[in-house]
């Protein structure tokens, strides 16, 4: 799996958009970008994933640069419940590869009132 | 549907002892993976089992072992416990239906403390 680099921590005001960056300059053509988050004392939760196109779901949006060397997870209207550690993972898709995900230390997002 | 369930949720052991952690995947999920999460760090991959066969192993010593049963539940065993084995042990499952997604569903974990 390609290595990812994320800032260790970020703050965001409640109600504002939270933009979490991730660098993955060694990403391969068949590797997807996945985002998970982990709220304190819980297991990680899947948020979104993408290959090269921008993606949006009910939780967030994922913006991937054209060269695919970096991406940004956007939480459009952050709430206090979005305070968590956010992990960016790069790997080949498929359930046989999913189980071998390499997690870094992630970004601790703190949403402040 | 029930999510991934793990037991026990918390346990305390002493150095040199053995521990068995259990995981039940989401119904219909055939792939189970184990991760170790030391405080302040991201989860580290230990094992993956798919259709009852080991499909991957992380950089962990032979004191760590696992198996998957015919009903796809799984056990993680750790022998000769060390203080450094204190961690949150996470189990995750995934489904054939997610072959192109590769979404992992995690349990709440088993918190192991070694004294």
Image (cartoon, coloured by chain):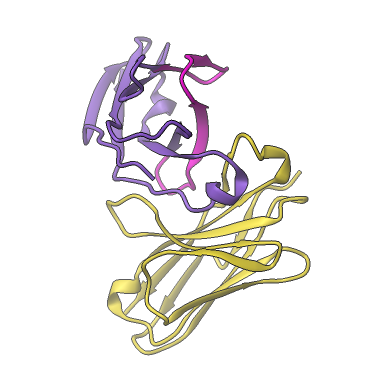
Pick the quarter of the image with the N terminus of chain A: top left
Q: Is residue A80 above or below residue A30?
A: above
In this rendering, would A48 be left or right of A111?
right
Q: Residue at x 47, y 85 (%)?
A: B18
In reply to whether residue A61 is colored magenta, the answer given is: yes
Q: Where residue B17 sits: x, y (%)?
A: 42, 88
Closer to the camera in the image, B50 or B87: B50
* For residue B28, above or below residue A5: below
Left or right: residue A24 compared with residue B96: left
Q: Residue A3: give x, y in percent of width and height.
A: 30, 42
Left or right: where A92 falls relative to B115: right
Q: Quadrant of the C terminus of chain A?
A: top left
In this picture, which residue range is highlighted in magenta?
A39-63
Q: Is residue B100 above or below residue B7?
A: above
Give the color of chain A as drawn. Answer: purple
Residue lying farthest to the front in this orientation: A29
Q: Position of residue B92 (x, y in %)?
A: 57, 53
Residue located 41% across and 37% down the image: A90
Could you tell me which residue is drawn at 55 percent across and 38 percent down?
A: A93
Relative image position of residue A78 (x, y in whole percent): 40, 17
A12 vs B24, nearest the viewer:
B24
Seen in the picture, residue B94 relative to B47 is either above or below; the reply is above
Chain identifier, colour yellow: B
Residue A12 in magenta stretch:
no
């Amino acid at each position: 799996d390609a290595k990812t680099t994320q800032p260790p921590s970020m703050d965001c005001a409640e109600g504002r958009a939270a933009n979490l960056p991730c660098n993955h300059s060694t990403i391969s053509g068949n590797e997807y970008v996945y985002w998970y988050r982990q709220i304190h004392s819980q297991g990680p939760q899947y948020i979104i994933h993408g290959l090269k196109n921008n993606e949006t779901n009910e939780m967030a949006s994922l913006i991937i640069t054209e060269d695919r060397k970096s991406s940004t997870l956007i939480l459009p209207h952050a709430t206090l419940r979005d305070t968590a550690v956010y992990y960016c993972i790069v790997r080949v898709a498929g359930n046989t590869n999913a189980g071998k995900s390499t997690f870094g230390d992630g970004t601790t997002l703190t949403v402040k009132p | 549907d029930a999510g991934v369930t793990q037991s026990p949720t918390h346990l305390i052991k002493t150095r040199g002892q053995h521990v068995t952690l259990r995981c039940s995947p989401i119904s219909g999920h055939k792939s189970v993976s184990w991760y170790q999460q030391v405080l302040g760090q991201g989860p580290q991959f230990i094992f993956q089992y798919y259709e009852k066969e080991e499909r991957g192993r992380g950089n962990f010593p032979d004191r760590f072992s696992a198996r998957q049963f015919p009903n796809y539940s799984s056990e993680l065993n750790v022998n000769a416990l060390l203080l450094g084995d204190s961690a949150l042990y996470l189990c995750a499952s995934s489904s054939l239906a997610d072959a192109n997604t590769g979404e992992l569903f995690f349990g709440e974990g088993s918190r192991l403390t070694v004294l």
